[in-house]
């Protein structure tokens, strides 16, 4: 019988991808005590960065919001990998930090980041309510429009 998180993913039509391997000399996640730290995830889909360019000039808010959703899906994929396939070990999403590649004058990073925040709340329920930061950046790796990292409390 599927657990509530897997059921919500299925109901939302989300199939978690294979967790991405790191692109440089870092770990995709670290577990320390009962905390899971997930490295920044890009908006990849089918093995490629799906949304590229600066938000506010190359990319509109709707596409950037979808990029944030993809980042959240990839965070969940990393969490599933870190937790041996068992997302029920997630006690609480503590914090998301969202980096939005922003054109000069773009000030809606918080709106873009809602894509990830809403997805996490929809998938994790009450445990998906979190603190966050939404920060504008001049550029991101691979010309990605959004990158998001996460801190998650887990059952030890």
Image (cartoon, helix red, strand yellow):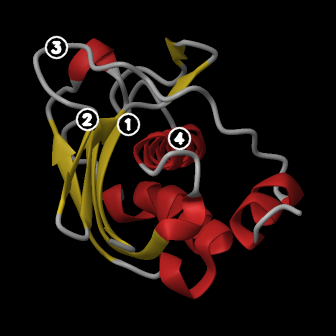
How far apart marks 2 and 1 lie (CA) works out to 6 Å
Residue 41 position, x and y percent, is 36, 36
Q: Residue at x 83, y 61 (%)?
A: 2
* Residue 11 visible in the picture: yes
Q: Nearer the viewer, residue 44 or 57?
A: 44
**Callout 3 crowding tier (Cα within 10 Å): few <14, some 14–19, many ≥20:** few
Q: Quadrant of residue 109?
A: bottom left
Q: Say which mark, if any, is on residue 24.
A: 3
Q: Quadrant of residue 57?
A: top left
Disc 1 element: loop
Q: Nearer the viewer, residue 103 or 27?
A: 27
Residue 115 position, x and y percent, is 54, 57
**In the rendered structure, are the residues bearing label 4 and label 1 in contact, judged by CB atoms less than 8 Å apart?**
no
Specify which label sits upstream in the sequence, 4 or 1: 1
Q: Residue at x 55, y 12 (%)?
A: 47
Q: Residue at x 58, y 46 (%)?
A: 85
**In the rendered structure, are the residues bearing label 2 and label 1 in contact, judged by CB atoms less than 8 Å apart?**
yes
How far apart marks 4 and 2 lie (CA) works out to 29 Å
Q: Is residue 105 above or below residue 15?
A: below
Residue 74 position, x and y percent, is 50, 39
Residue labelled with disc 1: 55
Q: Say which mark, if any, is on residue 103.
A: 2
The label nearer to you, 3 versus 2, is: 3
Q: Nearer the viewer, residue 69 or 18?
A: 18
Q: Is residue 94 above or below residue 51?
A: below
**Callout 1 crowding tier (Cα within 10 Å): few <14, some 14–19, many ≥20:** many
Disc 4 element: helix
Q: Quadrant of the N terminus?
A: bottom right
Instruction: Answer with left or right where residue 48 lies relative to residue 30.
Output: right
Residue labelled with disc 4: 77
Disc 3 element: loop
Q: Is residue 84 above or below residue 25?
A: below
């Amino acid at each position: 019988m599927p657990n509530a998180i897997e059921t919500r993913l299925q109901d939302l039509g989300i199939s978690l991808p294979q967790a991405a391997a790191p692109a440089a000399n870092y770990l995709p996640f670290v577990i320390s005590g009962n905390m899971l730290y997930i490295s920044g995830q890009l908006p990849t889909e089918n093995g490629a960065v799906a949304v590229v360019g600066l938000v506010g000039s190359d990319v509109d808010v709707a596409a950037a919001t979808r990029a944030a959703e993809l980042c959240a899906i990839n965070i969940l994929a990393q969490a599933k990998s870190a937790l041996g396939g068992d997302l029920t070990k997630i006690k609480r999403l503590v914090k998301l930090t969202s980096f939005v590649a922003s054109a000069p004058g773009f000030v809606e990073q918080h709106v873009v980041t809602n894509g990830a925040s809403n997805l996490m709340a929809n998938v994790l329920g009450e445990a998906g309510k979190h603190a966050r930061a939404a920060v504008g950046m001049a550029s991101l790796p691979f010309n990605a429009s959004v990158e998001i990292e996460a801190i998650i409390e887990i059952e030890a």
